[in-house]
Amino acid sequence: MENGAVYNETTEPEAKVPRRRLLGCTLRHLWGWRLPFKVLQTIFSFVAVVCEEVVDDCITCSGLYFFEFVSCSAFLLSLLILYVYCTDFYESLGEDKVKKL
């Protein structure tokens, strides 16, 4: 008993924390033709928002306001999709929740 055989270590050694990439960026879930397509979609929707803001005056603005809503919504949703699929947020949510989203 005096040699310390009774008292064993009760805790496990600390595991090393895995290194995370800068901003957690990964292209594992968005690969092939999908990545360039989503990037182009985001760029085109941003260009649409900018082009809509260039218009100074209009005769009937209801169509322009609808176009502004649609292009701004498309831009924000495209950014959200790129963020979810290209960062570690995909693993945080889980695949089933991402598909529901």
Image: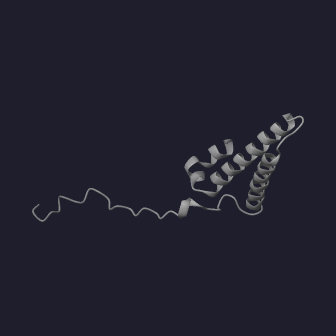
Q: Is 89 displayed left or right of 1 in the figure?
A: right
For this rendering, which residue is in front, 46 or 61?
61
Q: Measured from the top left, where is residue 55 in percent x and y?
A: 83, 45
Q: Measured from the top left, where is residue 77 in percent x and y?
A: 71, 46
Q: Residue furthest left?
A: 2
Query: Residue 86 lies in what quarter of the image?
Result: bottom right
Query: Residue 34 lies in what quarter of the image?
Result: bottom right
Residue drawn where x is 72% and y is 50% of the image: 78
Residue drawn where x is 74% and y is 44% of the image: 72
For this rendering, which residue is in front, 35 or 5?
35
Q: Is 41 displayed left or right of 11 in the figure?
A: right
Location of the N terminus by quadrant is bottom left
Q: Residue furthest front?
A: 56
The way the protein has been coloured in the rendering is one colour
Q: Is 95 displayed left or right of 51 in the figure?
A: left
For this rendering, which residue is in front, 50 or 46?
50
Q: Is residue 58 above or below residue 92?
A: above
Number of numbered discs: 0
Q: Measured from the top left, where is residue 30 in percent x and y?
A: 69, 58
Query: Residue 67 lies in what quarter of the image?
Result: top right
Q: Is 51 displayed left or right of 5 in the figure?
A: right
Residue drawn where x is 61% and y is 62% of the image: 26
Q: Measured from the top left, where is residue 51 in percent x and y?
A: 81, 50
Location of the C terminus by quadrant is top right
